[in-house]
Image: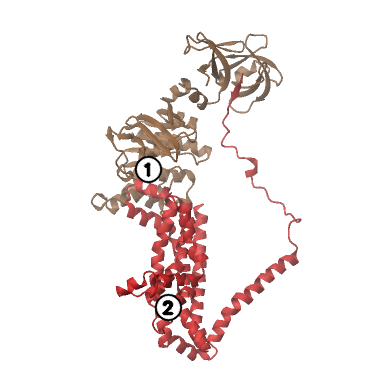
Amino acid sequence: MSLEARNITKTFNGFQALKGVSLTVERGEFMALLGPSGSGKTTLLRIMAGLDTQDGGEIRFDEADVSGIALRERKVGFVFQHYALFRHMTVSENVAFGLKVRPAQSRPNATEIKRRVDELLHLVQLEHMGQRFPSQLSGGQRQRVALARALAIEPSVLLLDEPFGALDAKVRKELRRWLRRLHDEMHLTSVFVTHDQEEALELADRVAVMSEGKIEQVGTPDDVYHRPETAFVYEFMGNVNRFDCRIQDGQARVGPLVVAAPEFPSARDLPGLAYVRPHDITLRAPDEPGLPAIIRHVFTAGPGIRVELQRRDTKTQIEADLTHDASRQLLLTPGTEVSLTFSGARVFAAG
Amino acid sequence: MNAETSFAMPTDIQPESKVAAPRPVNTGTADPAWAKLLLIGAALAFMALMLVLPLVAVFVEALRDGIGKYLSAVSNREAWSAIRLTLIVAGIAVPLNLVFGLCAAWSIAKFEFRGKSLLITFIDLPFSVSPVISGLIYVLLYGAHGWFGPTLAAMGIKVIFTVAGLVLATIFVTFPFVARELIPLMQEQGTEEEEAAVSLGANGFQTFFRVTLPNVAWGLLYGVLLCNARAMGEFGAVSVVSGHIRGQTNTMPLHVEILYNEYDFVGAFAVASLLALLALVTLVGKSILEWRMGQRLSRGH
């Protein structure tokens, strides 16, 4: 089932959480709502589910407006951030809940319910945990129970609120790969909320980046990472160095460096900001042309080398990521003078 | 000119302070042994003198003239009538307060609305008002010369000096117990489980009886237990509205007072011993429930 939000607005006690958000999730797609806290992503997800009601706009499931349809009628699988498992029920009872509360005429019989529960527990790899209580499970296991419980009602869409937020780093990684596989097998239209760029990029077919109640950009992980449309997206999608610059005739000047700014072909001395990712910075010998800087710190731990530099002219901090290979050709000691060039930069108008 | 870098904190690195180190014993702040003994001794002596001794005295006095006297004192017609009336009053007031308390706690914990803090304050009113005043309020409202008394009397309904008055006064006095017990519990649990239930297709009844109620069951029982103890033991408010008609509007605490005033000490203490037994049963039940709730809490977190 496809899912569409049209011009959704929502205000909480005078705070405008959503300022006219429109978004289409295609059938079978895995969509991430990515944004910092307060960007409205969870509010949008809850409105899609029917847990909250929008002030304006509509939610459509397969072209049909569901705005007037109550949460319990929408058949939405919702996975809560803190799982919201029924604490007094066993794992099996939790999973069976959605089937047991059906009206008598559509309720499967006890054997059928048991079969379905076993099937779902097998799917989430918790076959032997059926008789446990939620409090006896680890975070990752609880998350999987919550998922099995949501899937039991055969939902038309699956909505997940920060599904990995409460888990530790290692479990989080494993679980998100597993969830991606599960999604690919089930072909369920899914939307999940996250504030973690890496998670969104790794998991989703498309990512909607949100900020202050608006969608900044919707696109494939490749799009939003490599071709950010706004300064916000550029900053949010990874570490970035920001340089004040002046834009003139499709070029921006950062100190002595000239950076292409094709978006501003006819600008006349326009104040701008040039964004440069740490891995797009190249260190050269001080006599070569470039932006003069001094090495302050070198961190060699990890897959690459991170160098903290200070600009000679403005004394501001710059971070650069080098590969171990590239660093072998340079003498990286604090205090060394270098010249910086950018292999990639993106210029936005300031303000 | 301005250059800025932002790097996300690695999430898998725990702050150093999280690592539990054995805490060195700080002898500088430890109390000397004599102070500890003195404080514990004082607390125990106070307990024995003020709480245990009177309790023991009740049973000693009740059994002073032998078990036969005791049994006849608690099984005569008037005593039986007082016991029966106490059970009836508690039997009506406690279930009603269970429902009222649950409603109040539910609305306070699960909804946001104007006047919520006012409602919370009003729930505590019966605790902060002297029980005698509570009784007098009802006389003022429903008495022969009260606000509603004459109207109700014209309709043939009498409240003051009847069981209805006793029940009303008892409900008023015991109202906070259930609500007070449930509000923090329900607030802590939040509304996520209910939301989950509804998203899975449960209707309001199913959500309440399958999710909300089981989650607060132990707290509810605890509140009911305390509510019941107070309902059966209440003296002040009940005394004002009762009229002390023997065999008709005398509850156990009132009966104790009458017997005592008539110098029937064995009778008074015999009936009092029943109330004391109720207190002991309540305490045991309370401890069991506290233990159960503690277990659930430690499992839940």
The subunit carrying tag 2 is B
Q: Quadrant of residue A12?
A: top left
The residue identified by callout 1 is: A51
In this rendering, position of residue A78 left or right of residue A241:
left
Q: Chain A hue?
A: brown
Q: Does residue A189 appear anywhere in the picture?
A: yes
Q: Is residue A35 left or right of residue A280?
A: left
Q: Residues within 10 Å of mark 1 (few under 14, many from 20)?
A: some
In whole angstroms, how far apart are the C-alphas of marks 1 and 2?
51 Å
Residue A210, given in percent of the width and then of the height, sits at 45, 30
**Quick one: which residue is furthest to the front in this view?**
B145
Residue B63, x across and y down, in percent = 53, 87
* Looking at the image, residue B146 lies above or below residue A338: below
Residue drawn at the location 32% of the way across and 31% of the way down: A27
- The colouring scheme, among rainbow, by chain, secondary structure or one colour, is by chain
Disc 1: which chain?
A
Query: Which mark, by number, is residue B242?
Result: 2
Residue A278 visible somewhere in the drawing: no
